[in-house]
Amino acid sequence: MQATPDDVPLRLHLAELLLDVGKVEEAVTHVAAALQREPNSIEARALMGRAMAGQAGPPVPAVSRQGVHRDEPTDRYTFNFKFNWAAAESQFADMTQPWLIDPGTKPLVVKPPYEVEPATVRLADIAGMAEVKRRLDSTFLAPLRNPDLRRKYGSGLRSGLLLYGPPGCGKTLLARSIAGEIGSRFLAVSLSELINRWPGSAERNLHLVFTAARRAAPCVLFIDELDALDRKRSRSGGTGSVRAVVNQLLGEMDGTQQNNEGLSVLAAAEAPWEILPTLFAAGRFDRTLLVLPPDVIAREAVLRQHLRDRPVSVTLAGELAKRTKDYSSADLAVLCENAAERALRDSARTGKTRMIDIRDFDAALATVRPSVGAWLTLARNGPKPSGADVGYEELQHYLKLRGLT
């Protein structure tokens, strides 16, 4: 802890160990330090609540209303725990508002760590991306939309699909639209957030995620950043801890101990060919779909969305869409923000409000470049057209069209 004082997960792990052995005041000090760094940490708040309630050490024997063990004389049972409330109040006085009750004395609603959402997006709501939507509809969605056919052929609503491609190109939005198309609820998590905890917690977190999705079935569970497993393997210098996480994930997907009826598992990654191949066996993520930067129709829709509430002529969106080939949806958002900031600074300097015009976007285009280049380099050196790296024919075709193979 002295070597890495800003490591919040480590500090919370230490606080939990201290609570387990009854060192409440020392645990509170570490939880307070964690809350100073991450005021909204659900884990830190839970530990603080446990400490304030005096839930330290092993469970105490059952007591009567008078605080006496039901089976023992009063002189053989005493409470020795004393908590320094004044010290705790002093530690928190200038740090944060109470998290259980707001200033208006109304209970503060704390969102659960894994929140299931209703499906509100359909494929028709996504502009452009015609080829992606066609392949998605024909190879994945068609059987899921027809429950009668599923029953006839004895097939449940269980499926695995991997969306891969450059970052910021709409993989999460596509996953949401899949939930909308089949009338399921939607639960999205980032694998990097699940595994960046203290040792052993990733497996527990995965189980909690799948449990929440099963309870909400029919549900689409979307696991983003699946290639975080490869980054974890690189940091740890081996595959031991990664293998444990993968085994947990496979066990949850296979439904060996739980009923996965009505659960569809989708995932997204930038470089899936670097992940352990076990994840792509039959019945798991055995289908892949390449999601590339938006086409001109999609780019115009994205630009209109980001310029909708800003002082700009909507006619600019069509012109800019033609000039932004290879820009991801995230790149276009940054482009609009950059142009708006330039017009804002100019208006502040002159004292006169003006529209965002093409000059602002010309300047923004000179500084905001497509982010797909780094991913293309990664993909070019990634999967091979034959051998173990099967399932990436779309990618090989795309690289060939760009002259990169």
Image (cartoon, rainbow, N blue to C red):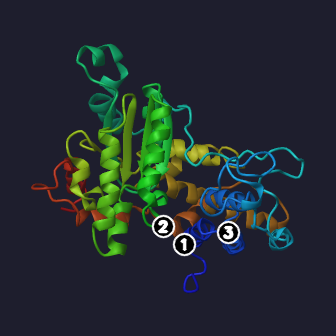
The answer to which of marks 3 and 1 sits earlier in the sequence is 1
Residue type at mark 1 is Leu
In the rendered image, the quadrant that contains the N terminus is: bottom right
Of the image marks 2 and 1, the number of the one nearer the N terminus: 1
Q: Percent from the top left, x then y, of residue 28?
A: 71, 70
Q: Which residue is mark 1?
A: 10
Q: At 46% across and 60% down in the image, what residue appears?
A: 201
Callouts 3 and 1 close, C-beta under 8 Å: no
Q: Name which residue lies at 72% across and 73% down.
A: 25
Residue 143, disc: none
**Number of numbered discs:** 3
Question: Which residue corresponds to mark 2?
Answer: 198
Instruction: Tell me if residue 286 comes above or below residue 195 in the rendering.
Output: above
Separation of disc 2 and disc 1 at Cα? 6 Å
Above-or-below relation of 208 to 141? below
Which circle's residue, 2 or 3, is located before the other in the chain? 3
Q: Residue furthest bottom?
A: 3
Question: Percent x, y for residue 175?
Answer: 43, 40
The residue to which callout 3 is attached is: 31
SS class, disc 1? helix
Q: What kind of residue is marked 2? A: Trp
User: Percent from the top left, x then y, of residue 46?
Assistant: 66, 56
**Quadrant where the C terminus is found in the figure:** bottom left
The answer to whether any part of residue 243 appears in the image is: yes
Q: Are marks 2 and 1 in contact (CB under 8 Å)?
A: yes
Give how far across and how far down residue 95 sits, in percent. 80, 69
Which element type, helix, strand or loop, lies under badge 3?
helix
